[in-house]
C-alpha cells in the first residue's frame, strides 16, 4: 500500500534499508527499526503498515479487533470512554510488539459523543502516524425500554452514540481518507485502499422488542454506510457495516453492577436483566452457541483487508446463522 510513496521517501527507504534498518512508510511518515535486519509482516500481514482507528476498543469486540489488527501489522489507535481500559489495551498491544517504531498502538481516551472529540482523535492520529487507512465505528451501548416507556433522554442517547458520533468521525477523517485519495488521483496515482467499517446490529436489521431506540439507531448505521460507499467509492474508500448477533460481550451478559457514565453523570447499567443468551443461542442459532469477540473481530479483519477489495456498501450479518 505504501509503495506509492514519493521519490524522496523511496530514496530514504533504500538508503536506510541498505544500512540494515527495517523501514516502513506509515501514512506520510517513515518509521525505522534499527534492531531488525528486515521488515517481516507479523502473522499474515493482512494490514501491514496501515493505520486504524477503532472506537470503543477498551473492551469486548473493539479490544479484540485492536489486538488482531495489530498482529496483522496495523498501527492501531485505541480509543474508549474508559480511560483505564483504553490505556491497558494499548499497553498490552505495545508489550507484544516491543520492536515496533513508532509504537504499534496509541491510546486516545475520550467520549465519542463529545462534539469536539472526533477532531482531537484524528489530530492525535495524524500527529503520530501521518495518515488514516481504516476507521472502525464500534463504540456503543444499549439503553433498553419498551416504546411507551422510553424517555427522550434514552432515545436521544442512542441516536447520538450510534449515528451522530460516527457521522462526526467521518467528517473529521474525510481529509485523510477521501481527501487524501483525491490528491493521489490528481497526481496521477491510483488511491491506496482505505476502509470504513460501521457496527450495526441484528436489532437494527430485524427490529427487537424493547429496543426501539437502539434498533432505529442501528438501522441508521446501515443507511449511513451505503451513503458513504456511494460517495467515497470513486476514491477507493470502501464502507461496509457488520450486524452482530449473539456475541459474548458486556451488552449480552447477565446484568451485574457494571455500567457506563454519560456526560451528565447518568449511569446506564450494562447487560440484560433476567436473560441468559447462552441458553437462548442453543435453541435459536444453528451453530448452537454464542459468538466470541475474537470471531467478531475476525469479520472486521476480513472486511478491512484487501481480500474484501470488491466488497462495498454491504451489511454483513455475523450471527452463526440466526434468522436464516
Image: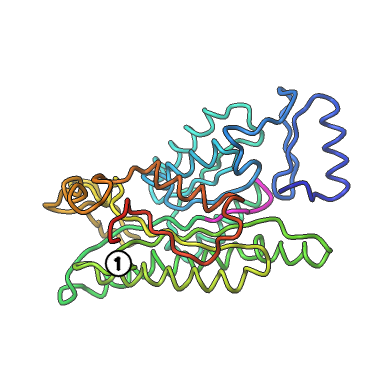
Question: Residue 33, located in which quarter of the rendered image?
Answer: top right
- Classed neighbour count for the residue bearing mark 1: other residues with Cα under 10 Å, few (<14), some (14–19), many (≥20): many
Mark count: 1
User: Which residue carries the number 1 mark?
Assistant: 214
Residue 156 as seen in the image, left or right of residue 8: left
Q: Position of residue 85 (x, y in %)?
A: 39, 41
Q: Residue furthest left?
A: 274
Q: Quadrant of the C terminus?
A: bottom left
Residue 145 in magenta stretch: no
- Which residue is nearer to you in this view: 219 or 156? 219
- Residue 31 location (% of width, % of height): 72, 37
77 shown above or below 309: above
Secondary element type, mark 1:
helix
Q: How is the image coloured?
A: rainbow
Q: Position of residue 266 (x, y in %)?
A: 26, 60
In this picture, residue 298 sits left or right of residue 171: left
In the image shown, does 226 or 254 lie closer to the viewer? 226
Question: Can you give x and y, in whole percent of width and height, for residue 115 in the image?
Answer: 47, 66
Task: Indicate the quadrant where residue 199 lies.
Answer: bottom left
Kindly identify the residue that appears in the image at 44 percent across and 59 percent down: 112
Q: As drawn, is 215 to the left or to the right of 58?
A: left
Residue at image position (19%, 67%) is 210
Residue at the (66%, 56%) spot, across then down: 193
Q: Is residue 133 magenta?
A: yes
Q: Residue at x 49, y 68 (%)?
A: 225
Please state the extent of the stretch shown in magenta in the rendering: 129-135
Determine whether 96 is above or below 28 in the image: above
Amino acid at each position: 500500500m505504501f509503495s506509492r510513496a514519493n521519490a524522496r521517501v523511496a530514496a530514504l527507504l533504500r538508503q536506510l534499508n541498505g544500512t540494515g534498518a527495517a523501514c516502513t512508510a506509515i501514512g506520510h511518515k517513515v518509521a525505522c527499526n534499527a534492531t531488525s535486519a528486515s521488515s517481516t509482516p507479523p502473522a499474515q500481514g493482512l494490514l501491514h503498515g496501515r493505520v486504524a482507528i477503532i472506537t470503543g476498543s477498551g473492551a469486548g469486540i473493539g479490544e479484540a479487533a485492536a489486538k488482531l489488527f495489530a498482529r496483522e501489522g496495523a498501527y492501531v489507535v485505541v480509543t474508549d470512554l474508559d480511560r483505564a481500559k483504553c490505556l491497558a489495551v494499548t499497553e498490552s498491544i505495545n508489550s507484544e510488539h516491543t520492536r515496533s517504531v513508532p509504537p504499534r498502538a496509541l491510546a486516545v481516551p475520550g467520549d465519542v459523543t463529545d462534539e469536539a472529540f472526533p477532531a482531537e482523535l484524528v489530530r492525535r492520529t495524524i500527529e503520530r502516524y501521518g495518515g488514516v487507512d481504516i476507521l472502525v465505528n464500534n463504540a456503543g451501548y444499549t439503553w433498553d425500554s419498551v416504546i411507551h416507556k422510553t424517555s427522550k433522554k434514552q432515545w436521544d442517547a442512542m441516536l447520538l452514540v450510534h449515528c451522530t458520533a460516527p457521522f462526526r468521525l467521518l467528517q473529521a477523517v474525510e481529509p485523510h481518507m477521501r481527501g487524501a485519495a483525491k490528491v493521489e488521483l490528481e497526481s496521477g496515482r491510483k488511491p491506496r485502499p482505505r476502509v470504513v467499517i460501521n457496527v450495526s446490529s441484528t436489532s437494527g436489521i430485524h427490529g427487537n422488542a424493547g429496543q426501539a431506540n437502539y434498533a432505529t439507531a442501528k438501522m441508521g448505521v446501515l443507511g449511513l454506510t451505503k451513503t458513504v460507499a456511494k460517495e467515497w467509492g470513486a476514491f477507493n474508500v470502501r464502507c461496509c457495516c457488520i450486524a452482530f448477533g449473539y456475541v459474548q460481550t458486556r451488552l449480552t451478559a447477565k446484568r451485574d453492577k457494571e455500567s457506563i457514565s454519560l456526560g451528565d453523570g447518568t449511569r446506564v447499567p450494562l447487560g440484560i436483566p433476567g436473560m441468559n443468551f447462552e441458553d437462548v443461542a442453543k435453541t435459536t442459532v444453528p451453530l448452537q452457541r454464542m459468538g466470541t469477540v475474537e470471531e467478531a473481530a475476525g469479520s472486521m479483519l476480513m472486511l478491512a483487508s484487501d481480500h474484501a477489495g470488491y466488497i462495498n456498501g454491504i451489511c454483513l450479518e455475523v450471527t452463526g446463522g440466526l434468522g436464516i
